[in-house]
Image (cartoon, grey):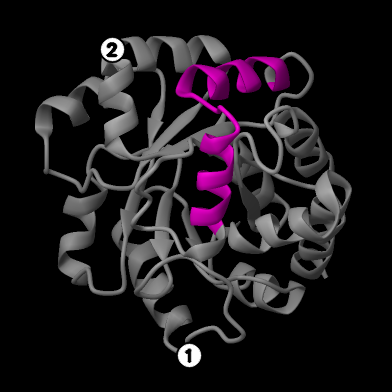
Amino acid sequence: MISRAFAARRARGQAALVPYVTAGYPERGSTLAVMEALADAGSDVIELGVPFSDPLADGPTIQHASFVSIGKGTTVRGVLDDLTAFRARRDTPVVLFTYLNPLLRYGLTAFLRDAGAAGAQGLLVTDLPGGSDPRIEAEITSSPLDLIRLVAPTTPIERVPEVAKGGSGFLYYISRMGVTGTRTELRTELAAEVGRIRAAVDVPVAVGFGISSPEQAAAVAAVADGVVVGSAIIQALDRGGAAEAGRFLASLRAGMDR
């Protein structure tokens, strides 16, 4: 479903829009309403974050969302229950965004089984670099879930196919070094970097980290197959809940499609 969502946008000359939201934020019972608002506002794929107590790859906005969610009782099982409820009402593909520790504590085999049953289409494990644990990677790639790989600006272009090996759905390009968070500018080298990466892999390339305005989303959409937005969605939730998150995402979609 993920590759089909990207292909459908490509056929229309557009880029896919992939918002991120932390499950259980801002309230334990708010996940369904937030996901529905994002789906209805133009999401092609939704990244649903599993809150983790040590989210080192995330900036202060998403870290805060994770800590609040955990403090209000969100568990891995609870995230899968939220996804089950969403899947009964919407068909937007969902990627579960997580760290390795929660999967191992839950039990990897059980998690892959239960995630598939709940309606997930993909899995992004931020601290599982390509080749770091072949056994775990093999179990994920043999499941029905797409394994979403990550590539950074420091990845030599000749290594990109190796890093992306076993991945499917799309390749997530981290557009800048550091942790997640909104930025006021995009790097001038981005277009050339994305072009080289797209030429090196046979899956769509989505760009994230720092996108916070319709203008930035449009600039990324002009050079990439997809646009990933995370911290700015959390900030919209803080301003006005699910309705504001939906309005903000719709503004990004409109900017991308002009």
Q: Position of residue 227 (x, y in %)?
A: 59, 60
User: Which residue is drawn at the image coordinates 47% and 51% (left, top)?
Assistant: 204
Q: Are the two marked residues, 2 and 1, in contact with CB atoms closer than 8 angstroms?
A: no
Residue 254's x, y, as percent? 84, 64
* Of labels 2 and 1, the one closer to you: 2
Quadrant in which the N terminus appears: top right
In the image, is residue 170 part of the stretch drawn in magenta? no
Tell me what residue is drawn at x 79 percent, y 70 percent.
255
Q: Which residue is mark 1?
A: 188
Q: Which residues are magenta?
A: 62-86
Side of 83 relative to 142 (left or right) = right
Majority secondary structure in the magenta region: helix
Q: Amino acid at mark 1?
A: Thr
Question: Residue type at mark 2?
Answer: Thr
The CA span between labels 2 and 1 is: 42 Å
Residue 217 at what x, y percent from top left?
67, 70
Q: Is residue 124 left or right of residue 48?
A: left
- Quarter holding the C terminus is bottom right
Where is 251 relative to 106, above or below? below
- Tag 1 or tag 2, which sits nearer the N-term? 2
Who is closer to the viewer here, 106 or 166? 106
Q: Observer-nearest residue: 49 or 45?
A: 49
When asked about the image quadrant of residue 34, the answer is top right
Q: Is residue 250 above or below residue 44?
A: below
Which residue is nearer to you in this view: 105 or 121? 105
Q: Is residue 199 above or below residue 8?
A: below
Residue at the image point whose x is 79% and y is 19% from the top:
89
Q: Which residue is labeled 2 in the image?
A: 109
Residue at 73%, 79% in the rendered image = 215
Residue 75 shown in magenta:
yes
